[in-house]
Image: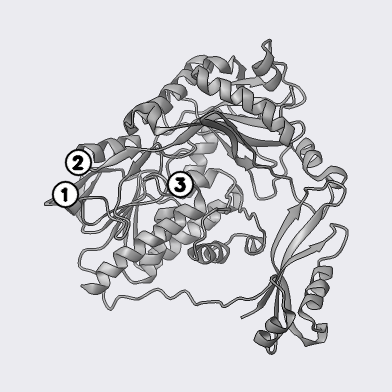
């Protein structure tokens, strides 16, 4: 049970050991009394450019920790109790094994939880395993043909496998500590345990995903890749089967974690009478700047300091009932082709662990509401596709792109200072023609307003590439708050981002575990 001393500030020019000495001072102890000390959390405070600080939480182990914490009389000192993560273990494998649809973050962690419990889950993933998926994606990025079964949206690890592997989240869920530790255990860099904004990076995440798969299989789990679920059998308000590529499997408990892009699967659920509703989401573009410019804007004279990492930002500005905001910021990253069908252009952001690319990019999006579509989730989904299809018609194989200066003021884009990183090429197109006027107007107003919050954000030579449409699912499958089962259907657990209950790797993984706990509770009672 280490003591955690938070709000320890050191200059980037000071060694990390300076944080330890300041923590010992707060605790009123000598270094000789300390068994072990480490940085448990670290972030950058760059609000004042002339005095950028590293803000640390220091974990200290020593004798008489409770007495020392009481004596310190500081709100920044807490005694952290580390509760063991105990997963109940079944006495025998269930006669009807639980089924998981989708092997993104939610499906992976639901599968890992149930496998460790001895439930031997059966998992269906419509895409390929990560090795095959990576080859298919890289071939597409180099100009090859899109593989609709192995792409950025579908396959082992979910859409997050080809992103930045961000592990930040706004949810306050104790499961997050378990998730972070499992990522590290399966091959993620150890620094994710201490960074306030941890990330794994696309390059390392692929290996982590494979290692989680291998543990699930070693514990009796079964994973069917390139197996799209085309039917869920429901009788008398209960799940009875799952069919994938024509083969039927008995099922009583099904965790539906298919992700936000499984549009045909959502249509199947609609035909089965599963209740759904429209939810808010956002559409827009990816914006690219030089990472060096973002570093200067955020860190001032400390830009490029070796003790600091590539700078990030998160910005928002309300425009009437809508909001322009940045999302999924990828320092030192790339804008990547992310379509899952041949007649569409979809963009996303990606960074490797080193975040050492020349450009920074982020989604710059405008919020849209359920009311925009009369509450019909399938009209919302069609709206996404209409934008993606129009982008393809505008640019063909290339993504429509424009400099910020041309977008705001008209004229021809002259890409130079910031070169578009979209791998299949960028075509100079008028992005105002890609979106409805209300979306375009918010994006333009937002660009100008956000420039006041981050100097240079509306740099005329920054590049906009579109469209960014898969920010989150436009659909929420209604579920019981207590049981987490779909309303009116026993045994069906709508889960994570695709079902409208998560918004990133961490929250999706946590929801996967939450649903797995409910399933396991049923199995233990059998």
Q: Is residue 368 left or right of residue 2?
A: left
Q: CA distance from mark 2 to mark 3?
A: 25 Å
In the picture shown, does residue 524 fall above or below 484? below
10 Å neighbourhood of mark 2: few (<14), some, or many (≥20)? few
Marks 2 and 1: CB-CB under 8 Å? yes
Closer-to-camera residue (360/244): 360
Q: In front of the other: label 3 or label 1? A: 1
User: Which residue shows up at 57% across the image and 78% down it?
Assistant: 81
Q: Earlier in the sequence, mark 3 or mark 1?
A: 3
| Residue holding disc 3 | 158
Marks 2 and 3: CB-CB under 8 Å? no
10 Å neighbourhood of mark 1: few (<14), some, or many (≥20)? some
Closer-to-camera residue (181/440): 440
> Tag 2, which secondary structure?
loop
Q: Earlier in the sequence, mark 2 or mark 3?
A: 3
| Residue holding disc 1 | 234
Q: Position of residue 377 (x, y in %)?
A: 34, 33
> Tag 1, which secondary structure?
strand
Quadrant in the picture for residue 238: bottom left
Closer-to-camera residue (422/32): 32
Quadrant containing the N terminus is bottom right
Residue lying farthest to the bottom in this orientation: 64
User: Which residue shows up at 50% across the image and 34% down it?
Assistant: 338
Q: Earlier in the sequence, mark 2 or mark 1?
A: 1
Q: CA distance from mark 3 to mark 1?
A: 26 Å
> Tag 3, which secondary structure?
loop
Question: What label does residue 272 carry, if any?
Answer: 2
Q: CA distance from mark 2 to mark 1?
A: 8 Å
Q: Is residue 100 left or right of residue 13?
A: left
């Amino acid at each position: 049970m280490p003591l955690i001393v938070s709000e320890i500030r050191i200059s980037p020019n000071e060694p990390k050991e300076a944080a330890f000495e300041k923590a010992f001072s707060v605790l009123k102890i000598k270094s000789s009394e300390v068994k072990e000390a480490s940085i448990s959390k670290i972030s950058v405070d760059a609000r004042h450019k002339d005095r950028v600080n590293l803000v640390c939480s220091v974990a200290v182990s020593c004798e008489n920790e409770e007495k020392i914490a009481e004596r310190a009389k500081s709100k920044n000192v807490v005694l952290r109790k580390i509760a063991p993560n105990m997963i109940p273990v079944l006495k025998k494998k269930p006669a009807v094994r639980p089924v998981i649809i989708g092997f993104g973050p939610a499906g992976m962690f639901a599968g890992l939880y149930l496998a460790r419990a001895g439930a031997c889950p059966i998992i269906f993933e419509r895409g390929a395993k990560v090795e095959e998926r990576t080859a298919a994606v890289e071939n597409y990025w180099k100009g090859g043909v899109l593989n609709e079964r192995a792409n950025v949206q579908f396959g082992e690890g979910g859409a997050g496998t080809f992103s930045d592997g961000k592990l930040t989240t706004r949810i306050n869920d104790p499961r997050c500590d378990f998730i972070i530790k499992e990522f590290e255990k399966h091959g993620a860099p150890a620094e994710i345990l201490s960074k306030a904004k941890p990330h794994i990076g696309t390059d390392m995440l692929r290996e982590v995903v494979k290692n989680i798969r291998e543990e699930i299989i070693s514990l009796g789990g079964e994973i069917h890749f390139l197996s799209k679920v085309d039917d869920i059998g429901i009788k008398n308000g209960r799940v009875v089967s799952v069919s994938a590529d024509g083969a039927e499997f008995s099922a009583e408990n099904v965790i539906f974690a298919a992700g936000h892009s499984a549009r045909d699967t959502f249509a199947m659920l609609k035909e089965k009478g599963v209740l759904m509703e429209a939810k808010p989401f956002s559409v827009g573009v990816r914006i690219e700047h030089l990472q060096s410019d973002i570093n200067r804007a955020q860190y001032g004279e400390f830009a490029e300091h070796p003790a600091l990492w590539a700078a990030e930002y998160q910005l928002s500005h309300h425009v009437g009932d809508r909001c322009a905001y940045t999302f999924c910021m990828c320092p030192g990253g790339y804008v990547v082709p992310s379509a899952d069908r041949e007649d569409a252009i979809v963009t996303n952001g990606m960074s490797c662990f080193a975040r050492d690319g020349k450009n920074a990019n982020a989604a710059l999006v405008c919020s849209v509401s359920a009311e925009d579509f009369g509450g019909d989730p399938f009209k919302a989904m069609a709206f996404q596709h209409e934008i993606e299809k129009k982008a393809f018609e505008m640019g063909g194989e290339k993504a429509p792109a424009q400099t910020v200066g041309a977008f705001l003021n008209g004229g021809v884009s002259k890409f130079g200072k910031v070169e578009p990183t979209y791998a299949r090429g960028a075509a100079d197109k008028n992005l105002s023609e890609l979106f409805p006027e209300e979306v375009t107007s918010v994006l333009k107003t937002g660009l100008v307003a956000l420039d006041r919050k981050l100097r240079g954000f509306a740099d005329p030579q920054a590049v906009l590439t579109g469209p960014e449409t898969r920010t989150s699912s436009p659909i929420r499958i209604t579920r019981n708050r207590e049981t987490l089962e779909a309303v009116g259907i026993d045994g069906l657990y709508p889960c994570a981002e695709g079902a409208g209950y998560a918004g990133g790797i961490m929250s999706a993984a946590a929801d996967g575990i939450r649903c797995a706990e409910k399933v396991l509770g049923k199995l233990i009672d059998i």
